[in-house]
């Protein structure tokens, strides 16, 4: 099976992880800060807080922005469920903003008109979570403007987008989001097996997120409410979690990030091959905005004839091509239907779902494998 995505692990990665296994620290040692510094430097952020998953990063990001009961979190219906679930973790209500049909990202115009209505009914969101689908940044300038106008915070779910850029700056540099989250799950651009990072320019948010990932505990005297009893002293000043990344994961991350630019370039080259090789078929290809440069986490085609969607998907799988579908609209999941969402609520997302197929794309993909994918699509669609 040619997979839709796959990690790339080198001997150097393995050596770095083995060194940690033989060292003094398996957790809470020097590697996590080293990885955080490497990510922060790469994307030009002041702070990066490493945790055990992007889901945890989204959760502590929302908590740091005081999302709680009575508040709303808005996100895109075309995302992994975690982008919405973290709102529920915080006790907030979740709602969705329909996507732009070309980019599959939250549509700024749909956001603007939903905000206008919410302002009248007193249901404005406290946090909006735009998702950089496939590694292409959302139109963050427009979303940032709306955030000042309607007074909400932005947690950018850039799980797909480390190494991507927007208006010539790396995603996560802090100009357009209060906090930006990346995932290091094995199918993403670089991996730590499981892992995530929350990047921010705010020292206050960074301090708060560092506490929240480790039980709400601080050892920094300047953050303490009382006086220190001695060198052993620490204070729990709020309720946090154990969301820490291990030293093994961080060592893998440090090794992987040295190849980030190469990975993005290789993905981008593969994507260009698809863009021209598939152009003559009855499908819609992913549209790229001038302001963005994608990390190409996913390559998603949409069939013009949705009646053949399932048959073509099944035929590709039968031909050993590991296609996938990202994503089932979150509002149609049984959990969210129970909260009152229903088919028809976000028609552009639902139309997308009826036509979309993620085809294989990863840095070590062989030319011959990409040709197999192209030929299979030609045979099925011509
Ligand atoms: C992968 C992913 C997540 C969750 O990341 P984990 O590291 O697996 O927790 C969240 N949002 C999006 C858009 C993702 O693709």
Image (cartoon, rainbow, N blue to C red):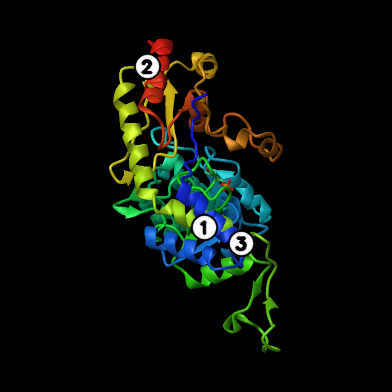
Task: Mark 2: give few (<14), some (14-19) or many (20+) Cα within 10 Å.
Answer: some
Q: Disc 1 to disc 2, how far (Cα)?
A: 45 Å
Residue wearing tag 2: 282
Residue 62 is drawn in which quadrant? bottom right
Name the residue nearer the viewer: 182 or 92. 182
Q: Residues within 10 Å of mark 3 (few under 14, many from 20)?
A: many
Labels 3 and 1 touching (C-beta < 8 A): no
Residue topped by disc 3: 63
Q: How far, Cα to Cα, is label 3 from label 1?
A: 27 Å
Checking the image for residue 251, the label placed there is: 1
In the picture provided, is 51 more to the left or to the right than 173? Answer: right
Q: Is residue 148 above or below residue 107?
A: below
Give the answer, above or below, for where 211 lies relative to 270. below
Vertical placement of residue 345 versus 139, above or below: above
Which of the two marks, 1 or 2, is nearer to us in this view? Answer: 1
Q: Is mark 1 within 8 Å of ligand 1?
A: no
């Amino acid at each position: 099976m040619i997979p839709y995505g796959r990690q790339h692990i080198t001997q150097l990665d393995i050596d770095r992880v083995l060194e940690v296994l033989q060292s003094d620290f398996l957790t809470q040692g020097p590697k996590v800060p080293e990885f955080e510094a490497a990510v922060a430097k790469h994307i030009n952020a002041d702070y990066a807080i490493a945790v055990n998953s992007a889901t945890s990063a989204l959760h502590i990001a929302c908590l740091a922005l005081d999302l709680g009961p009575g508040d709303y979190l808005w996100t895109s219906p075309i995302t992994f469920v975690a982008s919405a679930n973290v709102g529920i973790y915080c006790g907030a209500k979740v709602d969705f903003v329909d996507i732009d049909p070309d980019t599959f990202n939250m549509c700024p115009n749909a956001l603007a008109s939903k905000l206008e209505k919410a302002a009248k009914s007193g249901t404005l969101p406290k946090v909006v979570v735009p998702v950089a689908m496939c590694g292409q940044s959302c139109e963050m300038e427009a979303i940032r403007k709306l955030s000042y106008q309607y007074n909400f915070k932005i947690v950018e779910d850039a799980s797909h987008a480390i190494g991507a850029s927007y208006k010539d700056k790396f995603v996560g540099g802090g100009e357009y989001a209060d906090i930006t989250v990346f995932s290091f799950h094995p199918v993403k651009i670089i991996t730590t097996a499981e892992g995530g990072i929350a990047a921010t320019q705010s020292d206050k948010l960074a301090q708060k997120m560092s506490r929240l990932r480790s039980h709400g505990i601080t050892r920094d005297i300047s953050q303490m409410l009382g006086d220190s009893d001695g060198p052993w002293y620490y204070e729990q000043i709020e309720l946090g979690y154990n969301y820490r990344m291990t030293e093994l994961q961080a060592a893998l991350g440090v090794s992987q990030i040295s190849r980030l630019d190469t990975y993005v370039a290789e993905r981008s080259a593969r994507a260009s091959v698809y863009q021209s090789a598939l152009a003559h078929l009855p499908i819609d290809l992913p549209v790229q905005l001038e302001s963005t440069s994608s990390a190409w986490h996913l390559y998603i085609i949409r069939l013009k004839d949705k009646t053949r969607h399932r048959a073509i998907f099944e035929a590709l799988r039968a031909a050993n091509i590991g296609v996938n579908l990202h994503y089932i609209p979150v509002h149609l999941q049984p959990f969210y239907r129970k909260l009152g969402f229903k088919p028809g609520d976000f028609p552009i997302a639902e139309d997308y779902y009826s036509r979309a197929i993620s085809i294989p794309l990863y840095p070590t993909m062989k030319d011959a494998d990409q040709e197999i994918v192209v030929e299979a699509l030609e045979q099925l669609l011509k």
